[in-house]
Image (cartoon, grey):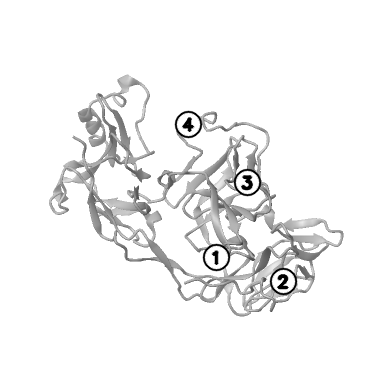
Amino acid sequence: MTWPPVALAASGQHRRRSNLWRGDSIIVGGDDALVSPNGDFSCGFHRVATNAYVLAIWFTASADPHTLAWAASRDTPVNGMGSRAELLGDGSLVLQDFDGRTVWSTATSGTGADRAQLLDTGSLVVSDAAGRALWQSFDWPTDTILPGQLITRRSRIVSARARGSTSSGYYILYFDSFNILTIMYDGPETNLNYWPNAFKTWYENGRMAFNSTRLASLDERGRFSSSDGLRFEASDVGPGVTRRLTLDYDGNLRAYSLDVAGGGTWRATWAAILRPCGVHGICGRYGVCTYLLDGPACACPQGFVPADPGDWSKGCRRLFDLRCGEDVRFAELPNVDYWGFDFKLLADKNSGIFNVSFEKCRQICLDDCNCEGFGYKKGGNGKCYPKVALWNGRGPEPKQFMYLKVPARVWKNLNMSSVMSLRYDGHACTKQEQNASGSYYISRLVRRGSHRHGRWVPVHVPS
């Protein structure tokens, strides 16, 4: 189910204005919204669940009402009755819930602010009588950057939690301590920088560290440039196109162009990561990301089930527990890699980690209670990767094999064999509306049946 914004600025039934003056307000449930002078952007209340709204800026011509350019207090929606956004007499633009409680503010009281204006650029600006900007939404991005908007050392672009959601997710675009523009997965259990490629040097990634500037921006023609040397162009580079750069809920950074003639649909014109299974945390702990005919999908190894069938970021859970010192067996998961979290990855060939036999690698994991499994790259003496945690599963990875610990006591009960299968279980999801009240809302993803639901897929083991 989808909902349109409360006010559609493209409609002639609504009063077109770009400014809020002191004492002016926008009331939730009303038919009023700010509209930029060129008509490209609208600002008003956007419904995120039953009886829950956020103050947001959206693209007037977009066919998808959930495509927002910005949202205030995205994780604290307000009630659908009596809430308002008002420019107070003291100069602060505030968002007030139904009970008059302020849940968000520009904190511009006492600055001489006399107006809030939605500009043609898509920025909401609080300014004084002389036109000096005292606060602007461009300085406080959510998940989207617009042409002319700067990414700075203070910027944190945070993805949405799920498709169609406005709440904050687990992916963050920011300049790291080496001044490299980076995407980080910051989940409830672990965090990791994964773009640019964490296994390559800055130079190999085409970046320059330790520069004294942290600035990046997208221009109106679709060209992006960053002070760390990152450069790219949209595939439709040129003037006259409405564009955005969004850190999507799936952890990929993409540039989009609005096809107004095509009904207001968005076309991706550039992506940071071409193979989605390279995104950290996309299938959660123990999950394996792979590619089927209809695109990427998440799976659980045999002996594991989805932790939450409607939210693959929560990964899989084991149907057994591992006890230190007990008899265990290793089940082979062929052509799969869980990258990262190697607890004994050493470069010294004499260390017993690189260029070792399979049996020695197995023993290293067997001797450490913290080892959940190990990766082994075959071909002569292989490379051994003992794992303290199993994240970022992906495949197919030729010649890469994972071996997961399974207690001998449950081996038969789980119908385990020496070779594991992968199970695809309801990867496709939709959003279900839930009741909400006050200044919070609840929404969740629910499983949608598909031809992949509950299917066990054996993995071919090369001879």
> Gap in Å between the C-alphas at discs 2 and 4?
49 Å
Whether residue 228 sits left or right of residue 38 in the image: it is left
Kind of residue at badge 4? Lys
- Residue density around tag 2, few if under 14, some if 14–19, many if 20 or more, within 10 Å: many
- From the viewer's perspective, is residue 438 above or below residue 322? below
From the image, tell me which residue sits under label 1. 64
> Gap in Å between the C-alphas at discs 3 and 2?
39 Å
From the image, tell me which residue sits under label 2. 86
Q: Which mark is residue 237?
A: 3
Q: Residue at x 33, y 40 (%)?
A: 337
Residue nearest the observer in this picture, 14 or 124: 14
Eye-nearest disc, 3 or 4: 3
Kind of residue at badge 1? Asp
Kind of residue at badge 2? Glu
Question: Which circle's residue, 1 or 2, is located before the other in the chain?
Answer: 1
> Gap in Å between the C-alphas at discs 1 and 2?
27 Å
Kindly indicate the quadrant of the structure image that contains residue 57.
bottom right
- Residue density around tag 3, few if under 14, some if 14–19, many if 20 or more, within 10 Å: some
Eye-nearest disc, 3 or 1: 3
Kind of element beneath mark 1? loop
Question: Which circle's residue, 3 or 2, is located before the other in the chain?
Answer: 2
**CB atoms of marks 3 and 1 within 8 Å:** no
Whether residue 200 sits left or right of residue 314 in the image: it is right
Eye-nearest disc, 1 or 4: 1
Eye-nearest disc, 1 or 2: 1
Position of residue 207 measured from the top left corner of the image (x, y, whole percent): 57, 33
Position of residue 131 measured from the top left corner of the image (x, y, whole percent): 83, 58
From the image, tell me which residue sits under label 4. 200
View extreme (right): residue: 130
Q: Which mark is residue 400?
A: none
View extreme (left): residue: 412
